[in-house]
Image (cartoon, coloured by chain):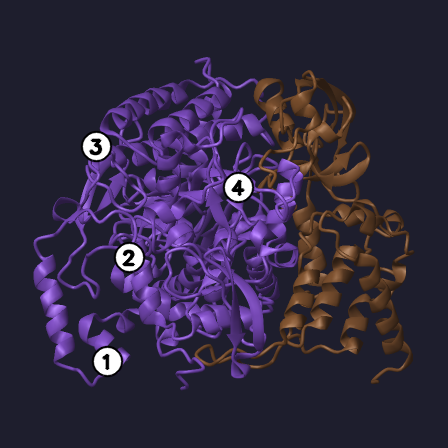
Amino acid sequence: MSTQMQARPADAAVTRRLKIHVLRYNPQDPASKPHLEVFEVDEAPSMTLFVALNDIRDRQDPSLQFDFVCRAGICGSCAMLINGRPGLACRTLTSGLGERITLAPLPFFELIGDLSVNTGKWMRGMSERLEAWIHSSSEVDLRRLEERMEPELAEQIYELERCIECGCCLAACGTARMRPDFVGAVGLNRIARLRLDPRDQRTDADYYELIGDDDGVFGCMSLLGCQDVCPKNLDLQTQIAYMRRKMLRAAVFPGS
Amino acid sequence: MKVVYTDVLVIGGGLAGLRTAVGVRRRGLDVLVLSLVPAKRSHSVAAQGGMQASLGNSAMGAGDNEDIHFEDTVRGSDWGADQRVVRMFVNTAPKAIRELAAWGVPWSRVARGSRESVVNAEKITISEAADAHGLITARDFGGTKKWRTCYTSDGTGHTMLYALGDQTIAQGIPVLERQEALALLHEGDRCHGAVVRDLITGELIAYVAKATTIATGGYGRIYKVSTNAIICEGTGIALALETGVATLGNMEAVQFHPTAIITAGILTTEGCRGDGGVLRDVDGHRFMPDYEPEKKELASRDVVSRRMTEHMRKGKGVPSRYGDHLWLDITGLGRAHIEKNLREVKEICEYFLGIDPVEQWIPVRPTQHYSMGGIRTDHTGQSPTLKGLFSCGESACWDLHGFNRLGGNSVAETVVSGMIVAEFVADYCETEGGELSIGTGLVREFLERERQRLDALLHGTGGESATALRESMETVMMDKVGIFRTGEELEAAVRELQDLLRRSRNITLRTKAPGANPELVAAYRVQKMLKIALCVAQGALLRTESRGAHFREDYAQRNDRDWLKRTLATWENDSDDLPTIRYEEIPVTDMELPPGFRGYGTRNHVDHPDTEARVAEVEKTLAEIPEADRFARQRALMDYESLLPEKYRGRNERLTERL
């Protein structure tokens, strides 16, 4: 039995001085212009970008804007471009990156300032547009035994439910570049999840009304960017391909 | 002057806040939710392990019911809980879980037939009944007699928050994100809403409401290392404290979770131990059975955390550059189980420690985790001293958990209290006293006061740094108000915190921007956090006994004779350097379960003078109705059902108790 923590590069090597380039811009301030600013930080063992950015804010520039909440990779607040690639900053160890690190806000979403973007507002809009909640007309008597569900089905639904709405999939999406109203892998996965759930009483014809166009499932060009960057490793392309087939069927054979 | 009017203002967009909002909306009221972050990013999302509800569907939960859940919770609380509230809670929890099931939470289900499991480090076979197939299953958690913790793999909080977040959207309830309440609007003994700051633009807005509900979670971040999300700073609770009218209850009751990973303080769920994981020391020895022969790793959290610390003090910790730690060993559970039911744990180990928990032990130590204390309310969620102010979830002390909370009871409390409190909030709004009765003059006065406070911070020249003050506070709390407490250290802590509080009135900012300004936010928050920290430290200093998570080395006994009471803290004047502490008795004479030994931990307490008589009374009452069923026996001892909103009364169906 191994009882030793693995030595990571940061533990073993001489302390590195990281050069963190941050794309800064504050739209609230008319004098602000987008620019890269470099902060130097001495790397510490087990340092994540969460630790590094807070260190910069606490000791160098208290005006730096960014978003962290759980700092454990589960809430989806801190997605940003890390060396050009969308990812969760909180669980990115600096030891896995070079000495020069470039951080930029997630594209596609409204910029609040520096590394902070308004993913919450977009996600709420998406949920409203896709009516992304269980639609059921059954009255539930809370005193009675719950409806049964096959254990495997519950697990399958949970697999798709694991999305944390971080926005990485949209930041990596070619269609989203061209179609600002594209619902993205996050939206399509959400519909796939609801479709799988017998508690949602809608039919494919209903889902077709929501995603049966180029802002929905037919907008996807299968570039696979979403799947490459998804921090939860969701099988997004399979879900999108499956939904495309189902929606095509709903269009060609309405009522089937 | 920007003023927004609504029926109900909910501050906090986690599970408790959202469930309250949905509840009052269904009663036809206008409701607005304020949230520091997008609602689905709230700390509720981090509840990996599960939610307690006595469904009794799975074989290991067979025979479970409200009575057993009640007893476990009261024992867990070390008799600090309000037993009527515990009864209300355990009777509503099954309804809450069934409601969430209808809203789409993919609860893990019972699968008929046999499967291998690990209990007490040994493989056993569990056989599930055919008639339970497809019903909601449960896992084992600390301090419970039955397997009662319902879950969705390892993403319980996530799935609950998403289902409730979606219901909020379905109901068309606005969630105003990145909005921070700075002060409650109040006059005399009536609360009228809040003054709120937009974190993007810096704009101040007054939200005027018939009822205001604070559901802002705990105050873990006053400690240096906490499992809590970074937004759990206790500033929502401070809103109530700063009125000088509302009271906070049991602020010294702070829980440390046994198994957070070292350095980052990120939680590994109690499900690790519930599913069969064990704790090991520097020699690889499984030490918990030496201390707790019956419950072992699954004694209540306060007990396990203390035993771990005790063991490390004996030199049995594993030394590391970050201090001593112990090992959590889940290798016996097997890859398939870990990758399905403990996947979040596996990811955390991979990303933050660079280890594979299927093969390697996880370095853990007790870390601040939960705040039992909070805004004191009655069983309806309303402040007894400030009308129109309600609170529920972790930010409240209505008092379900007493001095220690059981795992799985907090996430259950969020939704259960939201369901119950929403009804009472709606009732309140429909009464005459609930009508809006506030002049614009008062609104203007409060807006002006907050504007002046912010200006004073922006232009302050005292030279103090908010970051430095905060770091000092976190260290004082960690070192001197932690798992083991002494009078000497607590006195020093209070002194040092008072000094920090005074210094926090002289902060100087480098960034003067009135809009988005993280430094300004840090400054006004640290002023509030220091008041909260002082309530914790002063409460701990004055409580010369040990109860639940509050452990005094110089007063190791639980002392019911002198301390079976709830601590109440108020902050009477803004210029004060200390909270005013009062107490309210927890009457033994109407307890359904009179105080006794918890069944784990050390048997060491002084009885309350009324205990013996109440024990005899309970025995006598039950002896007189030998034929009565469990419901009648319960009713004979303590009434609670009349306290519940009517729609949540009534029995819960089980396979063995059909309606």
Which residue is disc 1 drawn over? B632
Q: Tell which of A179 and B628 is nearer to you.
A: B628
Q: Secondary structure at mark 1?
A: helix
Horizontal and vertical percent position of residue A167: 73, 48
Res A88 seen here: yes
Horizontal and vertical percent position of residue B222: 42, 33
**For discs 1 and 3, the disc positioned in front in the rendered view:** 3
Compute the Cα span from label 1 to label 4. Answer: 44 Å
Tell me the quarter of the picture where residue A115 sits: top right
**For discs 1 and 4, the disc positioned in front in the rendered view:** 1
Chain B, hue in figure: purple
Mark 3 or mark 1, which is nearer the start of the sequence?
3
Which residue is disc 3 drawn over? B554
Q: Secondary structure at mark 4?
A: loop
Dot 4 crowding, Cα within 10 Å, few <14, some 14–19, many 20+: many
Q: Secondary structure at mark 3?
A: loop
Height in image: A140 above or below B519? below
Q: Is the residue at mark 3 from the same chain as the one at mark 4?
A: yes
Horizontal and vertical percent position of residue A35: 78, 23
Q: Amino acid at mark 3?
A: Asp
Mark 4 or mark 1, which is nearer the start of the sequence?
4
Residues at circles 2 and 3 in contact by the CB criterion of under 8 Å: no
Q: Residue at x 78, y 68 (%)?
A: A210
Q: Secondary structure at mark 2?
A: helix
Relative to residue A97, is residue B620 drawn left or right? left
Q: Which mark is residue B229?
A: 4
Height in image: B228 above or below B87? above
Chain A, hue in figure: brown
Q: Amino acid at mark 4?
A: Ala
Q: Subunit of mark 3?
A: B
Which residue is disc 2 drawn over? B75
